[in-house]
Amino acid sequence: MLLCYLISSSSHLLRRSITPIYRRNRYFSAVTTTTTTTTMALSRHPKDEAYLNAVIPKRIQLFESIQSKQLQQLQSLPHDPIKITLPDGSVKEGQKWMTSPMDIAKLISKGLANNALIASVDGVLYDMNRPLEADCQLKIFTFDSDEGRDTFWHSSAHILGQALEQEYGCKLCIGPCTTRGEGFFYDAFYGESTLNEEHFKIIEKGAEKAAGEKQPFERIEVSRDEALDMFSDNIFKIEIIKDLPSDKTITVYRCGPLVDLCRGPHIPNTSVVKAFACLKASSAYWRGKKDRESLQRVYGISFNDPKRLKEHLKLLEERKKNDHRLLGIKQDLFFFDPLSPGSAFFLPHGTRIFRKLVDFIQNEYWKRGYQEVVTPNIFNMKLWETSGHAAHYKDDMFVFDIIILNLWAKSAELPLRFADFGVLHRNEASGALSGLTRVRRFQQDDAHIFCMLSQVKDEVKAVLEFIDYVYDIFGFKYELKLSTRPEEYLGDISTWEKAEADLTAALNEFGKPWQSLFAQTVFQVLVQIFKVSYPVQVNEGDGAFYGPKIDITVSDCMLKTHQCATLQLDFQLPDRFKLEYSAEDEAKRERPAMIHRAVLGSVERMIAILCEHYKGKWPFWLSPRQAILCPVSQKSLPYALEVKDEIHKAGFYVDVDSSDRKIDKKVREAQLAQFNYILVVGEKEIESKQVSVRVRDLRDSRPMSVESLIKFFKLKAMPTNKMEERAILDIDESLIES
């Protein structure tokens, strides 16, 4: 029967790079960056005292008035007994509209109460001091959880906003934690003034003051009219309020003098923030649109322990030294040019890495039953309207890379695994471009699997095993989370529930834990002894509009997190495009399921991540500079060129330093250029027909014949995981000794 299939691209997360310069003040350490251009300096810009004197008391008065009414209403409600079930299955007694998560934390232990930041009530994040409304499942999070850290940094953004508003009389816009999970920022309008590092000391002093006052984060719910009245002096907040759905609950939070429109939740009080730093100041457009108001954005970082801040600052310095944009220039890998903004120009050495990554994945495709296709770039907009992409991504589109083909397919031919390294384009805003991590032109290892519903679990599990194999070779640690149905979605709920159940089952059978290291150890024991399933972390409402997905978050050696691989289950697009296959009864037609997946994600972005992960010291199989011959003198040069030809014919990247520099200088330059192996040849090596092999970071060298060296290189050229690497080391030793 006729089966249509499609290959589409997936969107990428915005990640911004920070180039820090360090300094400290007495209490809160601060990181600053140099701003090269400024208009009117804020230090000379008078604070709008009249604005503050009119706005702050008005907001506080309205807040307290509404809060008083709501407290009276709560006290009048019946305080019936409720049961609060904890993650370990134990049950605590409480009272409706009286007992809060903090009360339960105190019953469990004083330590937990002191460290508790946020709670989850039946899967919904909840302030620790907010009264519980019914029987519920309760989880409590500290700073060492994603939920706890994100809330901690979101609340720190409010502390930052308070300092900015009090010091400069600015109009606050938005202040979230960052999407990369390391800190927060606050956007605000200052007229024509700008911020730079000279202002950070004042800002940090304001943050320190707020933390020292132990200001509680208080929450109220307001009507649309109350919200419009409360923020009538701030056009940005008014715009946000008017854009909210009519049935949306509007919440306002207060900490000290700051009253802010916010959905929350927040930490119990400001004193939890023990260390605070300003990282960077930059410009940003309101709502990311260049035709709107120009804002000032201040980035910050905070911790519950000053030692953690100190460690983080050291880590930022290490990241700065190994920024892929610096290493890319230093190692002649790639460059950018205004003639094609957001599109990388890969130089020969960078292209070597690019091709190696593509070849690596293509070889795995052969082993794992994928078929490659080649797709065009430009299509009629009707296609995107049918798929639903136009409604969600039109503002960011040049095109989405997608193709429709016609095939005869029967159930016996499923699953079909189609892969494509097509060139993709995304109309990124110029301010969002950042090295190789955020580009307008990129290639992605896209693949789409079409299968029967009964095959979904096994196919998803196979993709997870593929990702695990590749990331193990790269030396990445990663976390898996299930992202479920978002607020805006295609299809019916029953189909979504089926898809989410299939992904959950595949994750459980995959056998990798999705918790902290301690929890991993515990659950590994439980799995082995009691044969229980691993628990799955769930990102409620974070799925794609067409189906649930498994989020794969990678951690590199410098603890930066990245989202590269993607695995999404889609029952919607096969239906929208009327895809069909013939069942065993050929008269019967059925809809296939479709799995969107990528392992590397954007090849450009993966090169940036690996460059920083390896700190420019590429492993041999991926290295653009695998070996260099260093003749001791010009007399040794002909032999060096002869050896170079043999190694080149064997398929390896090899250079010769033919300069007249001394041998020690040649070796040092080769080490700085990050050649994996430095091959020294002199009169002794010419006589014995050998080379003296020196490893990049070691002083010792060993003689080897050229034949043994090439065999050694062939073994090292294979992408290997840890188990395979140990086996190769045994063989390496025997080769070197021979």
Image: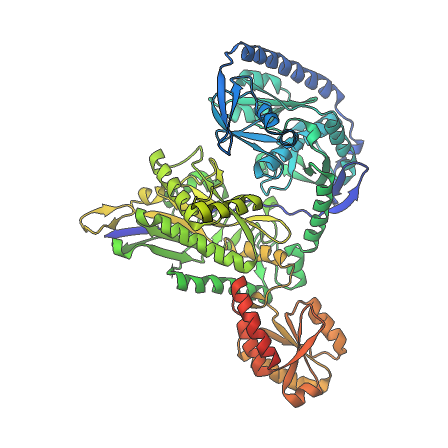
Q: Residue furthest bottom?
A: 687
Q: Residue furthest right?
A: 26
**Where does residue 3 sit, x and y in percent of width and height?**
28, 51
**Where does residue 564 sit, x and y in percent of width and height?**
52, 51
**Where does residue 35 sit, x and y in percent of width and height?**
74, 43
- On the question of residue 444 being in view, the answer is no
* Colouring style: rainbow
Front position in the image: 288 or 130: 130
581 relative to 499, above or below: below
Q: Residue furthest front?
A: 529
Direction from residue 175 to residue 567 in the image, left or right: left
Q: Residue at x 35, y 43 (%)?
A: 571
- On the question of residue 212 being in view, the answer is yes
Front position in the image: 287 or 707: 707
671 relative to 216, above or below: below
Q: Residue at x 64, y 56 (%)?
A: 324
380 relative to 110, above or below: below
Q: Residue at x 70, y 87 (%)?
A: 684
Front position in the image: 408 or 510: 510
In this rendering, the count of numbered labels is 0
Q: Quadrant of residue 47?
A: top right
**Where does residue 305 sit, x and y in percent of width and height?**
71, 38
Q: Quadrant of the C terminus?
A: bottom right
541 relative to 651, above or below: above
